[in-house]
Amino acid sequence: MDLRQMRYFIAIAEEKNITAAAHRLHMSQPPLSLQLKQMEEELGVMLVERYGKKFELTDKGELLYRHALNIIHSFEEVKNELKETDEGRKGNLSVGINTLSVPEFPDWLEAFHSYYPLVYLRVVQNDSAYLAELVKTRAIELGLVRLPLASHNLNYLHLYNEPFVFVCRNNDENNISIEEISSYPLILPSTEGLGSYNIIHESFTKAQLPLQVICECSDMNVLMQLVSSGIGSTIVPKSVFKSYGQENLFARKITDSTLISSVGLIWLKDHHLSSPARNFIEMIKERLGLDESSYE
């Protein structure tokens, strides 16, 4: 028996009349009578007792009716769940977030969860280079990263730019130049893997200025604690200071430099994206007012 025949039998069992069942199924009576006969022959049992035009289920018919209802209901549930998954209402979404943080991310995640509460979320935090590798191996679908980043085989949606700031314990509201910064002992965010490290080095190299690096740290909480202790100062994207800055630390605007951090969303090029991932991308584009020109 197939699902079509089960639907036929359910109609016959509930209507107890072959003509009424045929009308309910939008078909003529003779083909439905033939289907009932074929079901009985295939199963080798009598499914109904015939009393003129009326039917009554045998004990075998009652058993088949109960199982047919369960099977049809289960099939409909599967269809509905597949549809919800395809539309992004269910499923899984795995997102990587850069170690330097994206302050808007918790709000984005909260909004996405409110739109799609049945989607299971998995968040991974690491440096941009590692997140790119996770995307390439399909361990995660999306990654929020900082540039520069080798983007071979990746789609990149540029989200926004933000300036770097000089962070120290000195409460000085005046701007500071990179020439002045070159005289300070610095704790830089990360070693290899974070684009910010390269941006800082390139900016000072172009200006032909030295960098007094005394420490490198990829953990932003630890980095800010080190600066707070007075070991040195640091240069980080403005949003990082907002996320991790401490009470005795102050951010100063940096003048005459190319210290700009770019934030973007990456996913694997020429591969299928799940509906939850597509919905997440569209939500971010809408919230930031982005268009197709933001793609790279």
Image: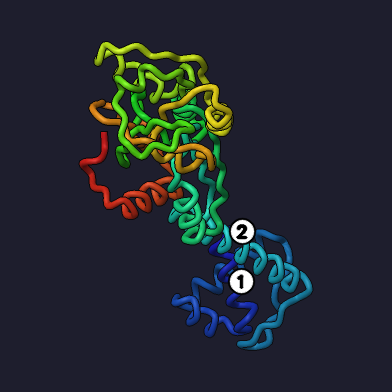
Decide: few, some or many residues near mark 1? Use Cα within 10 Å; few <14, some 14-19, many ≥20: many
Q: Using the image, tell me which numbered label, if any, was put on residue 84.
A: none
The residues tagged by marks 1 and 2 sit, at their Cα atoms, a distance apart of 10 Å
Q: Are marks 1 and 2 in contact (CB under 8 Å)?
A: yes
**Residue 59 position within the rendered picture, expressed as x and y whole percent measured from the top left:** 78, 73
- Which quarter of the picture shows residue 5? bottom right
Give the vertical position of 128 relative to 159 (above or below).
above
Q: Secondary structure at mark 1?
A: helix
User: Going from the N terminus, do you reach mark 1 or mark 2 first?
Assistant: 2
- Which quarter of the picture shows residue 52? bottom right
**Residue 172 position within the rendered picture, expressed as x and y whole percent measured from the top left:** 39, 36
**Residue 169 position within the rendered picture, expressed as x and y whole percent measured from the top left:** 49, 33
Give the vertical position of 236 relative to 32 (above or below).
above
The answer to whether residue 24 is left or right of residue 237 is right
Q: Residue at x 46, y 22 (%)?
A: 188
Q: Using the image, tell me which numbered label, if any, was put on residue 1.
A: 2
Q: Residue at x 32, y 49 (%)?
A: 285
Give the vertical position of 23 relative to 39 (above or below).
below
**Residue 186 position within the rendered picture, expressed as x and y whole percent measured from the top left:** 45, 20
Amino acid type indicated by mark 1: Phe
Decide: few, some or many residues near mark 2? Use Cα within 10 Å; few <14, some 14-19, many ≥20: few
Amino acid type indicated by mark 2: Met
Q: Secondary structure at mark 2?
A: loop
Q: Residue at x 35, y 28 (%)?
A: 147
177 or 55, which is in the foreground?
Answer: 177
Residue 142 appears in the rendering: no
Q: Which residue is mark 1?
A: 9
